[in-house]
Image (cartoon, rainbow, N blue to C red):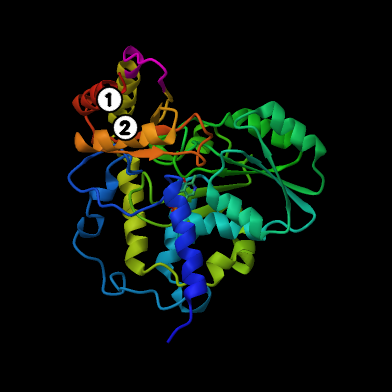
Amino acid sequence: MIHTHLIDEYLSQSLQKREQEGLLRQLACNEGLIDFCSNDYLGLAQSNLLSLDGTGSQEEMASGSTGSRLVSGNSPLAEKTERIVAGFHHAEAALLFNTGYMANLGLCSCIADKHSVFIYDEHIHASIIDGMRLSLAKRFKFKHNDVDDLRKKLKQAEGKVYVVIESLYSMDGDLAPLQEISDVCKEHKAALIVDEAHAVGIYGDQGRGLVCHHQLENDVWARIITFGKALGCHGAAVVGSSLLRDYLINHARSFIYTTAMPPHAFIVIQRSYQEMAVAQREKLFGLIHHFQKVARETSIEDVRFLLNPSPIQGVIVPGNERVKRLAEYVRQQGFFMKAILSPTVPAGSERLRICLHAFNSCRQIDQLLTAIKLFLT
Ligand SMILES: Cc1ncc(COP(=O)(O)O)c(C=O)c1O
């Protein structure tokens, strides 16, 4: 007999509380719906990249890597993939991690000691917050995309200073003022870290990302590239100097203490890079333009569209209950989207997050906006 009722009671009370607050998270399957939700911006996740030119060698198709990179999981294939990733993003070196979450956790937790300071955008991703929390460094946030506030915080910071931002923010779909932030970091000798999770594949020549687009490769200290969004596969890399790569191999615990990705995952990453370079970015930008045009014409009282120059759009519908009802309504109409509730976003800015993809169509966008208007008026 296992005596866990105290623990079980704790777990179920916590779930009941979430349910009462209307915040219970539940898994759902979403087959058969028109995708306005996923991060598969270019539609690459749907391609069967492993069978593009027949299967690879027996070694390349092995199911497992047998251990961590430092023990038995390293291979010429893994190192070649890192050279391809580094070269593509115009960086000296890259180190692969199993996910973007693990890349951010490993990086932020190991680069800073108690004499260090993180200054981060208030909208930064949870994986970076968790990584910073695991370090001994002090942490200060600056107002979202507010360069003056960042400058203020930098003036007060002492020791080794890191500034952490995203280049395209995943909830609002807006872009960071990268050039200005880079200039301020230079002025204050702070190391700039840019999470490019949502920007890679969308911006820059062949989808190299916003840092390359602004030619800031030499001014950004480290970048996080994730493969699970526009690249349509899985995994991530930290790109930067060879010194940083060597340091992470020695200190990043989410790199050291985990089984490496299997060989076929490296093949898929390499092929995703080839596909991404020639993907239908113009079509995606055409749809973004169409969405913005139609959304501007769709005036609804008390409702505001985010209208960003990115695939991440949104309609602000204040109140968790109302936006949840809207998400359920559009789902019944055949569209797949997520309501983003407070406290994930500030109360009053609850929203339906609308992700556009190269495989969507103008007609689908028109139908979606008509359905949203019908529900809200
Ligand atoms: C900005 C940002 N960074 C990192 C991650 C984590 O990446 P992954 O899904 O590969 O763990 C995400 C994913 O949600 C993200 O949006």
**Which residue: 25% across, 33% down?**
330
Amino acid under disc 1: Phe
In the image, residue 192 above or below residue 246: above
The disc label shown at residue 375, or none:
1
- Label 2 residue SS: helix
Magenta stretch, residue numbers: 295-304
337 and 326: which is toward the camera: 326
Q: Is residue 332 visible?
A: yes
- Cβ at disc 2 under 8 Å from ligand 1: no
Mark 2 crowd level (few <14, some 14–19, many ≥20, 10 Å Cα): many
Q: Is residue 83 visible?
A: no
Amino acid under disc 2: Leu
- Label 1 residue SS: helix
In the image, residue 127 above or below residue 369: below
279 and 176: which is toward the camera: 176
Residue sitting at the far bottom: 1
- Cβ at disc 1 under 8 Å from ligand 1: no
Looking at the picture, how far across and down is residue 284, in whole percent? 31, 31
Quadrant of the rendering where the N terminus is positioned: bottom left
| Residue denoted by label 2 | 326
Quadrant of the rendering where the C terminus is positioned: top left
